[in-house]
């Protein structure tokens, strides 16, 4: 296709520098006003990375404040029910604030403090990153402004209340589809305007360099721990690691240490939504789904868009996966074939929520339920000697409103599970 | 080349193409040129204009909803070129619609449409090697943004990459009108002068005759966007071309004829 060839050709020159590039993807496509701030951030991050005191403080807080390491748990009943591979759950849902997002928010807040920035900006979809950012801002006594689409504020109301209780200002965004993409636009506009005083804590492995690398580094702790844990518990590496992919931060964190391990399959699960037409899903990598390489919000990656290059609307029952683009490192892993990307529909994710709740007593976030939905399809195809790991990126407390509505609507499926 | 400022300061007028409709865009551009605009920036509407304030966001959204595509903007560009061969025409876009068309195809089409140059809001100089090569090949002038936050070494790279003129952003922020010209503006233009002989146009927050007059003391041209787009929003389509012409004439009152 000419458009893709043109885009790839365009990137070729820049790719030679390899700065902030994942293959041809990534890079920096922002208004010039932000460039000085991105360069400053890049330098500050490099200095922090090289500073043992930074790591010592981060690790200390991850342990004592957030509750790391998170358990790796063998889900016996789920494994038995599915009758295939043994399933291990990496329990990021047990972290303080209820999701993996705090790993990154904490790291970036420490960086902001090092840089002397007192005003923090963040965007949030499901509200988990917003809550994590509001939490670390309370911890460090920083001013916190969170942008959130009004549609997401409605469906994740509990998290809006949590952020406000933590002292953050939540600013609703009504533009576009009033979801994550629109919140990022508004957060970036705030950052462009207040760039000298503010630090933007971006919540996923997205955006302009150095964000995708930095966020991945802060989330990498997931696979660093899980690799040690699975070797202790199962005596071997997993055959597959499964994670849901919105922007892709929990997935890249869960995958990263396994990328060199060629025998470990990496499976990302996108939001299949309620249909295959453009606007009905958020499956950027789906064949014929409308995802084509392009530039959205600072980075070159797969982007759901129409033929004129306008960014498409997306739909998912989970606000955290409801996004038109995807982290550039996933784009590279997709093209190289190192990771495979599949999708789960809204209905499958809801069903998976019920299954995990009833079999293991664990209520996953709707985002994480997409990964559970995949393991429900995937594990039975494997023999009992196989080991599959699923990253449970967050817990489902925030979704009670949606679950109440959706489960009421389909009481039948509920009965199906409870009969087991 | 057609990008030339015949007075001091020159005047660059931004229009979001397709708002309120493509035919009105054509008529407004012609009125603006006849009223004294040296350059028309034809904005390609984009669904996610993250460098823009509320006025241009709304215009962009209206134009996208009407189905305005890059091809349509190029067609209007060609029509304006045919009607006013001497005017400067600059295509102003976010990157994604251009990538979707394909960079080389876009460059050929833009040249065939009579555009003089291109400005991509989210294209920075470090990423622009291939883009600049393709523009050069098509005989199009790339214009880059320079910001008050850009350190000198970036300003130098930006000035060297620009052709036609350098677009200096008057303040730290997004597009939109404001009461006073930002104090950042003059310092930025002075820093840029050390690196270029090209004219320097100042935009973002330039909206009145007073602004135009004041910036004429240190810059070569004024870029007026949100004030024009806001006027178009408030004016019925059939009256918009005349209203735009009148505002441009007023803005030109801030300039001395060379």
Image: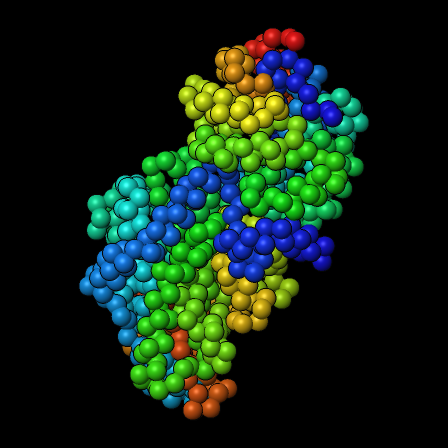
Outermost residue on the bottom side: it is: A384
Whether residue B19 is situated above or below residue A364 in the rendered picture: above
Q: Residue at x 56, y 11 (%)?
A: B254
A212 or B240: nearer the eye? A212
Determine whether, in the image, residue A254 is placed left or right of residue A98: right
Which color scheme does this rendered protein use? rainbow
In the rendered image, which quarter is residue B81 located in?
top right
Residue found at the far left of this picture: A64
Residue B232: x and y in percent read 59, 25
Q: Nearer the viewer, residue A75 or B198?
A: B198
Q: Residue at x 41, y 71 (%)?
A: A257
* Count of picture labels: 0
- Residue at image location 58% in from the left, 54% down from the top: A15
Q: Quadrant of the C terminus of chain A?
A: bottom left
Q: Nearer the viewer, residue A297 or B48?
A: A297
The quarter of the picture where residue A212 lies is: bottom left
Decide if residue B19 is in sight here.
no
Q: Residue at x 40, y 43 (%)?
A: A40
Horizontal and vertical percent position of residue A286: 59, 66
* Percent coordinates x, y for residue B11 in the rendering: 61, 19
As drawn, A293 above or below A190: below
The percent position of residue A192, horizontal first and vertical second, equals 43, 37
Note whether residue A333 is visible. Answer: yes
Q: Left or right: where does residue A50 sit relative to residue B25?
A: left
Image quadrant in which the N terminus of chain A is located: bottom right
Q: Is residue A116 left or right of residue A14?
A: left
Left or right placement of residue B130 versus residue A125 in this view: right
């Amino acid at each position: 296709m000419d458009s893709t060839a043109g885009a790839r050709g365009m990137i070729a020159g820049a790719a030679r520098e390899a700065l902030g590039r994942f293959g041809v993807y990534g890079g920096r496509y922002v208004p010039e006003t932000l460039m000085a701030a991105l360069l400053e951030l890049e330098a500050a991050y490099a200095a922090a990375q090289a500073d043992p005191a930074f790591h010592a403080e981060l690790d200390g807080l991850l342990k004592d404040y957030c509750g790391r390491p998170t358990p790796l748990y063998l889900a016996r009943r789920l494994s038995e029910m599915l009758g295939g591979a043994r399933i291990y759950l990496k329990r990021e849902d047990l972290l303080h604030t209820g999701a993996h997002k705090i790993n990154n928010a904490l790291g970036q807040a420490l960086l902001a403090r090092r840089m002397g920035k007192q005003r923090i900006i963040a965007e949030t979809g499901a509200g988990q990153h917003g809550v994590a950012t509001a939490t670390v801002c309370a911890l460090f006594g920083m001013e916190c402004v969170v942008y959130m689409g009004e549609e997401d504020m409605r469906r994740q109301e509990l998290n809006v209340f949590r952020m406000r209780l933590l002292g953050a200002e939540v600013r609703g965004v009504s533009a576009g589809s009033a979801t994550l993409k629109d919140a990022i636009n508004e957060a970036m506009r705030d950052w462009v305007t207040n760039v000298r005083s503010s630090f933007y804590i971006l919540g996923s492995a997205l955006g302009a360099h150095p964000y995708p690398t930095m966020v991945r580094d802060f989330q990498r702790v997931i696979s660093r721990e899980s690799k040690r844990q699975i070797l202790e518990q199962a005596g071997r590496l997993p055959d597959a690691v499964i994670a849901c992919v919105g922007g892709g931060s929990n997935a890249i964190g869960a995958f990263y240490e396994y990328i060199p391990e060629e025998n470990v399959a990496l499976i990302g699960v996108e939001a299949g939504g309620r249909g295959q037409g453009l606007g009905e899903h958020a499956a950027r990598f789906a064949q014929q789904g409308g995802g084509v390489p392009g530039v959205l919000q600072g980075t070159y990656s797969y982007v759901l868009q129409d033929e004129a290059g306008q960014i498409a609307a997306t739909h998912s029952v989970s606000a955290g996966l409801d996004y038109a683009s995807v982290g550039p490192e996933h784009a590279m892993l997709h093209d190289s074939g190192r990771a495979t990307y599949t999708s789960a529909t809204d209905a499958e994710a809801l069903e998976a929520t019920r299954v995990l709740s009833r079999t293991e007593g664990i209520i996953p976030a709707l985002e994480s339920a997409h990964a559970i939905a995949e393991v429900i399809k995937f594990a039975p195809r494997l023999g009992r000697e196989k080991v599959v790991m699923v990253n449970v990126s967050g817990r489902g407390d925030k979704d009670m409103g949606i679950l109440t509505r959706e489960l009421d609507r389909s009481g039948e499926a509920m009965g199906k599970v409870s009969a087991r | 080349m057609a990008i030339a400022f015949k007075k001091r300061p020159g005047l660059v007028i931004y229009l979001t193409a397709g708002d309120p409709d493509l035919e009105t865009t054509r008529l407004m551009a012609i009125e603006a040129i006849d009223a004294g605009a040296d350059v028309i920036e034809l904005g390609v509407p984009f669904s996610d204009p993250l460098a823009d304030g509320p006025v241009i966001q709304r215009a962009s959204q209206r134009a996208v909803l009407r189905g305005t595509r890059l091809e349509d903007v190029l067609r209007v560009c060609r029509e304006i070129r045919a009607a006013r061969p001497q005017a400067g025409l600059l295509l102003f876009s976010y990157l994604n619609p251009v990538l979707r068309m394909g960079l080389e195809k876009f460059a050929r089409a833009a040249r065939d449409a009579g555009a003089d140059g291109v400005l991509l809001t989210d294209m920075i100089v470090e990423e622009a090697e291939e883009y600049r090569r393709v523009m050069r090949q098509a005989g199009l002038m790339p214009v880059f943004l320079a910001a008050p936050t850009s350190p000198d070494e970036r300003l130098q790279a930006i000035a060297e990459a620009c052709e036609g003129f350098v677009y200096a952003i008057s303040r730290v922020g997004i597009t939109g009108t404001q009461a006073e010209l930002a104090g950042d503006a003059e310092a930025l233009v002075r820093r840029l002068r050390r690196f270029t002989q090209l004219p320097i146009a100042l935009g973002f927050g330039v909206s009145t005759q007073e602004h135009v007059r004041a910036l004429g003391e240190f810059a070569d041209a004024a870029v007026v966007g949100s004030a024009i787009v806001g006027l178009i929003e408030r004016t019925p389509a059939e009256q918009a071309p005349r209203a735009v012409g009148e505002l441009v004439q007023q803005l030109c009152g801030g300039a001395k004829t060379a």
